[in-house]
Image: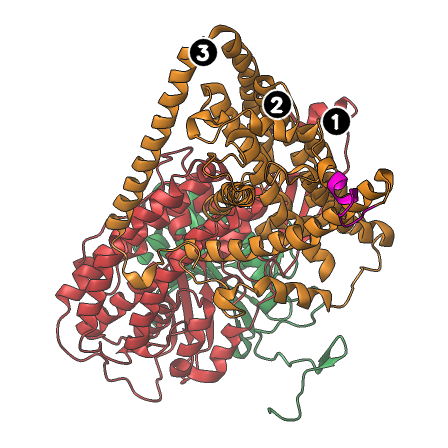
Chain colours: A red, B orange, C green
Amino acid sequence: MSLGGFDVQVLRENGFATEEMTLNMGPQHPSTHGVLRFVVRADGEIMTEAVPDVGYLHRSIEKISEKVGYHGFMPYTDRVDYVAAMPCNQGWAMVSEKLAGIEVPRRAEYCRVIASEFNRISSHLIAVGTMGMDIGAFTPFTHALREREHINNLLEELCGARLTFNYMRIGGVAWDLPPDFAEKALAYIDRFEPLIDEYNALISFNKIYKERLVNVAVISAADAINYNLNGPNLRGSGVDFDVRRDIPYSIYPELQFDVPIGTGEEGTVGDCFDRYMVRIREIQESCKLLRQCLQQIPDGPVLAKVPRKFKPPVGDAYVRVESARGDMGWYCVSDGSEYPYRVKIRTGSFTAMSIIEKVSRGLMIADLITVVASFDLVAPEVDR
Amino acid sequence: MRDLVLSMIADGGLLAGMPYSLAAPLVMVAFGALVVFGFVLPIAGVTSWLERRVWARIQSRIGPNRVGPQGFLQWLADGLKNLLKEDIIPSAADKWLFSLAPYLVVAGFIATFATIPFTSSLIIADLNIGILYITGVTGIVVVGVLMAGWSSNNKWSLLGGIRSAAQIVSYEIPAGLSVFPIVLLTGTLSMQGIIRAQGWAPWDWFFFYNPFTFVAFFVFFVAALAEGNRTPFDIPEAESELVAGFCTEYSGMRYLLFFLEEWGNLYVIGAIVTTLFLGGWQVPAFTDNQTLLTVAQFGTFFLKAYFFVFLAMWVRATLPRLRVDQLMTVCWKYMVPIAIVNMIGTAAWMLLVPEALGRMVQIGMTVGGGVVVVVFFRRVRFHLRRANLQPSDYYYSPII
Amino acid sequence: MDTAAIYSKLKERFGDVVLALETEHAGDPAIRIQPRAIAEVSAWLRTDADTAFDCLTNQSGVDYPDRNEVEVVYHLYSYSLRHTCVLKVGVSRDNPLVPTVDPVWKTANWMEREVFDLVGVVFEGHPDLRRILLPEDWVGHPLRKDFVEPTEYHGISTKRESML
C-alpha cells in the first residue's frame, strides 16, 4: 500500500514500524451527516480500513407500514429521507398505484414532477453545501441554504410544510398548485440559475478544493454497478443511467433533459470531484425540467378516485423512483387487505455505505469525510 | 522606555527619588500589565467579535447583534459565561499538564507584545533582537498545544495536537526565512529599526521595495497564518473532522484561552507584517504637536494591523482547508525554496541594482499595486451584477 | 427479454431447479427457484450474454407463516440490456438456509445481512453474517409475523404506563 511516495511496507522493513490505532468516529460527530459510526483502523493518518456501523437511526418504518395501512403510511415515507421527501412520497404512491392499477390524472403527475424537481434542487444544494463545509469552506454552505430557504417558502405555499411534505396521495396529490405559484416559481428559477455559476466560481474550481476531491476514492463503473450504487454516485462513475429517462415513469417521457455523467474532467472518472460536479449539473437540469413543467401543465383534477379503505389485489410490485440520492426501490407485498403485508425500501445511501469499507483502504482520515460527503449519505435513508 | 523611567524618577516625576534599578522594573511591569489587561485582552476579545461579524456577513448572515450596540459586547458576555462554567478535567487526563497547557499557550502569545512597536516611543522593550525574540517566543505555543493534545487522553486530541506541532514547526522555516530579506535590507533585527528604515509613503515600504520582498510578504503572511492555525491551515482544530482537535476535552475558561490566543495572534501577525513590510507607524510629519503625532502613528499602525486581521478572516471564510500531507507539501516543496530564493535575490539586488533603477522599480510596483486594487473592485462589481442578488440577500458593509 | 422468455431460457438450462413462473398475482411476474440452486442460477444470469444481469437492485425477505415459509425475493436489473427480472426463493421458517449470492453481486453482502437481521434467513457462505441495523445482542427477528416485542432491553422497560 503506498500513498504519494510513502511505501508503508518499505518503512516497516527498515525499522520504522508503527502500531495501528483504532479510532471511533462515533455516532455523534459534526460531519457524518447524521448518526453514522465508523470504526477506523489507522496507521498514523493513513487508514487501513474504515468499517461502518449503522443502525443508530433504525425506526422500523417498514414494520410500521403493516399497522397503519396504505394511506396512513404516506407521512412515514417522508421520514425515510427527510432531505428529499417528495420522491419518497412519489415512490410509495407509485407502488400502491401499480398494485391496484390506478391511473393518475395528468395534472397530478405534473404537480408531482414539479414538487420532486424542486426537492431535488434543495437536496442537492444541501449536498454540495455540506460537501464544502466538510472540506472546510463554510461559506458555500450558507449560500446554498439561503437559496434553499426560497425553495422551502415555495413548497410551504404549495403544501404547508417545509421539510416533511406529505404532499402526495395514492392517486394524485393532495392539493392543487396555488394560483400564483407558477409565476413565483418561474421568477425564482430565473433568479437562481445564474447563481450556480457564482457557486462554481466560489468553490467548485477552487484550487484547494480540487486538490481535496480530485483522484480521491475512485470507483470504477464495474464496481459501482456491482455494489449497486445509484443516482449521482453511479453517474459520477461514468455509467449513463437515470431512472427518469431509462425506466420512465410519470410524465418524464414528455420532458426534455440531459443526464450529466462524470467524465473525469479534473482527474479520474469516478472520483469525488466527478460525483460533486454531477450534482451541480443536475441542479441545472432540474431547473430546465421545472421550466418545461410549469409552462406545459394542463388543467384537470389532481386526485383520482381512490377508495378510503384501499385494498389492492394480492400480489407484489417493485417500483424505482429517482430520488436525489439515487434511485429508491419500493417493494410492496399485498395480501388483499387494507394493510400492506410487507414493504421494503431499498435506498441509495444504504448501498453507498456498503462500498465505503472497500474504498477507504489507503485513504487518509480527512479523506474519509470527503468520501462520505461525496456519496451524499443521510443516516435515515441508511437505517430506515 | 529608559527615557520614560528617567523622567519619572527625576524631581517632580511620579516616582521621584527612587533608584533606577528599582524604578525601571516597576515601570516596565506596570506598563506591561497595562498593555496586557488594557490592550491585549480587549484586542483578542474585539477580534473575536470582528471575526464573527465579518464571517457572518460573508456568509449572508448577520452575526451577533444583541449584546450591546451591534453586538459589540458579545465577547464580554462570552468571557463572563465561560468564567462561570464548571471546571471539568477528564478523570483519565493528566491533571497538571492539562491545566498547564492553556497557560503556556497564552503566555507565549502575550510575551510577543513586549516588542510590538505601537508608536515611535510606545514600546515596552525595544530589544535589538526584536523580530528574533518574537519568532522564538511564539514557539512556546507549540509546546502548549502539544501538551493539550497529549494530556487529554483522547486519540482525536492527540491527532490534533501532533498535526499542529508538525504544522507549526514546519512553517516556522518559511516564516523565518522570509524575514531575512528585511533584515538584510535594514541591517538590524530591532522592530523600531526596521520601521525607521522605511518611510510613510507606499513606495518607501519594503512591500514594494523589490520583487523579492514582495514575494517574501506573501510567503510570510501565509506561513504566519499556518502558524496561527488559521484556515486554510486549521487542520488541528478542524471542526468537521476532529470536533475541536486538540482542545476537544477543554471546557469553560481553559477552552476560551486557546481561542483568545488564536484571535490575539491574528493581531500579532498583523502587527509583525505591518512592521516588516508596510512601514509600521510611519506617518508624514504633518504637525509639531507630539501628542497628535503619537495618536496618528498609533492609529496608522492599528489600522494597518487590523487590515491584515480582516484579511485573515476573509480568507478563513472563503477557502477550504488543506489536508495534512498537502499542507506539508506546500511548506517544504514550495514555500521553503521560494523563501531561500527571496533571500539570495534580495542580497543580489542590494549588490547589483543601482539606486535610481531601484527607485523606479519601487514606484513602478506601487503603481502596479494600485492597478491591481482597481481591477479587484471592478471584478467584484462584475460578479455582483452577474449574480443579480436582491438587497435582502446580502449586506454591503463587512462590519456594521 | 421479458420474464417469460427468461423463464424458458432458465428452464432449458437448469431444468428442475427452476420451479415455476408466477404471473397470476397483481404486480410483477416472478420466477421461483429452488433455494439450493440460487447461487448457480444467479451466476449464470449474470454472465450469460442474453440476460447479462449485472446488478442486484433489491433483495428482501418476506415471512409467510400461513405457507410456513420465508421468501427471499431478488430483483435483478441489467444496465447493458435494460431489462428486469424477479427471482423468488422459498425456505422453511424453522430452518431458513439459502446460499449466498455475495460472490456474484457484492451488494448482496449488506442486503443479506439485513435480511438475516430482520427476517432471520441464514445465508450459507456469507463472509460476515451479523446483524446490521439492530444491536448485536438483540434477540429475535422483528419482521417475522410472530415477533413479540421484548419487555425490556438492558434493563429498560419497553412499556410506558401513559403516553403523556
- The disc at residue B280 is none
Return the x and y of residue C131 as percentages of the image width and height.
Answer: 64, 62
Q: Are marks 3 and 1 in contact (CB under 8 Å)?
A: no
Residue type highlighted by circle 1: Arg
User: Residue A38 or B227: which is nearer the viewer?
Assistant: B227
B69 is higher (above) or lower (below) than A324: below
Residue B13 is inside the magenta segment: yes
As for residue C147 lying within the magenta part, the answer is: no
Q: Which region of the structure is painted magenta? A: B5-16
Q: Which numbered mark, 3 or 1, is in the foreground of this view?
A: 3
Q: Which mark is residue B355?
A: 3
The residue under label 2 is B177
Q: Nearer the viewer, residue B136 or A384?
A: B136
According to the picture, the residue beneath numbered tag 1 turns out to be A12
Residue at screen point 51% across, 28% down:
B217
Both marks 2 and 1 on one chain: no
Crowd tier of the residue under label 2, counting other residues whose Cα lies within 10 Å: few below 14, some 14–19, many 20 or above? many
Tag nearer the camera, 2 or 1: 2
